[in-house]
Amino acid sequence: MRRTAAFRQVFGFCLAVLLWHSTQASATEVNRPIELSVDATEAPRKLLHARLVIPVAPGPLTLFYPKWIPGEHMPNGPINDLSGVKIQAAGRPIPWQRDDVDLYAFHCTVPKGIDTIEVSLDYLGTAAKEGYSASASMTARLAVLNWHLVLLYPKGTPVREQRVRARLTLPKGWKLGTALPVESANGATTQFQTVSLETLADSTVLCGAYLKEVPLGPTEGPPHYLVLACDSPDGLELSATLKTHYERLVAEAGALFGARHYRSYRFLVTMSDLIRPTGIEHHECSDDRVPERFLLDDTYRKIWTAWLLPHEYVHSWNGKFRRPEGLTTPDFQEPMRTRLLWVYEGLTEYLGFVLAGRSGLYTPELSRENLALIADWGRNQVGRTWRPLEDTTAAAPHLYASRTDWSHRRRGVDFYDEGALLWLDADTLIREKTGGKKSLDDFCRAFHGGQDGPPVVKPYTFGDLVQALNRVVEHDWKGFLEKRLTGTDAEPPLDGLTRGGWKLVYRDHAGDLFKARDGEEKSVDLTAAIGLLLKDDGTVTDVVPGKAADQAGVGPGMKIIAVNGRRWSTDRMRHAVAATQKGDKVHLLLENGDYFQTVALDYAGGERYPHLARESSKPDLLADIFRPKTTDR
């Protein structure tokens, strides 16, 4: 009996050792990173080559191409631009098959005895400006690399647990800027440190022949940089005044939130007329795309400088650190639930405007004009009478790709600007209820602040939001928000302007911001007057339901050939509308496909452009909202 027991004890010990070694081997396999090598030497002709070495186990394997791209809020991973996909192991090809339902999934079987596979693929770039990160992103002199474009990854493990070691090779003479930590650099090739797949996808690389990195103050805390890449060397000139505004932006954001959830932060600014102006947020950087003369032309700065970089910067706190529960998915394939985008994007829109004013990127006059334009835009969104704001968030994955024609009837991603009005309403209400002792700043500091440190994600729900607002000041915040989210009133939420001591009025001349926007967009915006939005060649972009152009039967896609008997021009159109105040009429000759027709507009109000007028019976809360909070001014 004792001998048998001893034998069992020894056998059990040996088995335990074997199992321990097996477990350690499995753990080693799991912990081995994916090796990703990207060859961007052909970026000037919009072509990227990638090679991945992926640790695997024998048996069935599914590889995913990213579908739901964080920050883009829709399943728009550019699967059609994936090319040359080949899988092999030990020098032999492995056949793959696309899934019948999920076209972003590739199935294969790993042979016995194989612990790594090699995947090669190409990404086919484009010159088209439609879309976001998958739109035009490469020119002859620069490129914006988002890693999700050149990536396949194995199903089963959350992306925050999968590790990747990436390497990038650039065209000769190009430089790069990125928040991704660098391990080493050898000539044109940069080896990055091993990070999670989630971090890799969140770390855009900006590169180009004309690139420079400008450190920004303040000196305390994590470092901040402007990384500038341009199609021409002249476009890299950054004035001392503008640099000071960006340094104040960094300081004002710190004062607003009270903590920074990043190790460093880089504004990656791509300046090219060949790339669509847009922005995508990341935790430790932002992908900001603007026209080539962004730093040189005052018109561009009014349109883009004042809101794009502040907006994407705010997302580091609101969207990346604090993120709606429905957007914290385990991988890039699970559908996102976008119903809280009125916080993710709407609050960010508002805070971006606030920080633009506090940092001096916007003057007080431009800050007010911006709110006036948004308020008037909200009044013209007639689709709000049938579609509540919350529905635009739930339908966001479709609305991001919706057309511009009939948008005043349909509604689009209105949760940005209408969301800004909603949060202005909340801000002024807090200030009113506390006699100016508290504001939305206190909510931001409590909800988005905490401790400095590296990137983390802290999800939240609608209930969490309501509780946090109630901790600032007791109020029926649930009812307040639900009314504005689910209502179908014709009037947008303008209580914040009224409570803030201002009211929306109209005057017969456009403001500086309005003129800059119309000039850059090559448009003629007469929506406040006759309800007509036009291209500068007379093509009708959209009409506002119920206004004069709509009542006369004008529709999107038609083209104005003549105004009051004379050939179309933007000046003649504006003069004709202005003359209605004296009793003149507006007659339009319209081209509608192969047919022509003449219509008369029943309108007598002259030119109308939105403006904010001071309401002296109330305190000027807007001045308080846009006033800098830092002592170094």
Image (cartoon, helix red, strand yellow):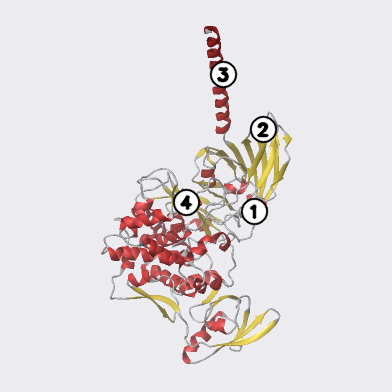
Report the front residue among 430 and 135: 430
| Residue with the mark numbered 4 | 325
Instruction: Tell me the element at label 4.
Output: helix
Earlier in the chain: of badge 2 and badge 4, it is 2
How many C-alpha atoms fall within 10 Å of the one at disc 1: few (<14), some, or many (≥20)? Answer: many
Camera-side residue of 230 and 340: 340
Horizontally, residue 232 falls left or right of residue 121, namely left
Q: Mark 3 points at which residue?
A: 15
Q: Earlier in the sequence, mark 3 or mark 2?
A: 3
Mark 2–mark 4 Cα distance, whole angstroms, equals 35 Å
- Amino acid marked by disc 2: Pro
Name the residue carrying label 2. Answer: 58
**Closer to the eye: label 2 or 1:** 2
Disc on the earlier residue, 1 or 4: 1
Work out how far the residue at label 1 is from the one at label 3, CA to CA, in angstroms: 54 Å
- The reply to whether callout 2 and callout 1 are in contact (CB within 8 Å) is no
Which residue is label 1 attached to?
125
Q: What residue type is labelled 4?
A: Glu
Q: Residue furthest bottom?
A: 583
Badge 2: residue crowd in 10 Å (few <14, some 14–19, many ≥20): few
Identify the secondary structure beneath mark 1.
loop
Measured as percent of width and height from the top left, residue 258 is found at 34, 50
**Residue at 52% over, 44% down:** 198
Camera-near label (1 vs 4) is: 4
Q: How far apart are marks 2 and 1 (CA)?
A: 34 Å
Q: Earlier in the sequence, mark 2 or mark 1?
A: 2
- 445 to the left or right of 297: left
- SS at circle 3: helix
Q: Can residue 267 be seen in this view?
A: no
Quarter placement of the C terminus: bottom left
User: Which secondary structure lies at badge 2?
Assistant: loop
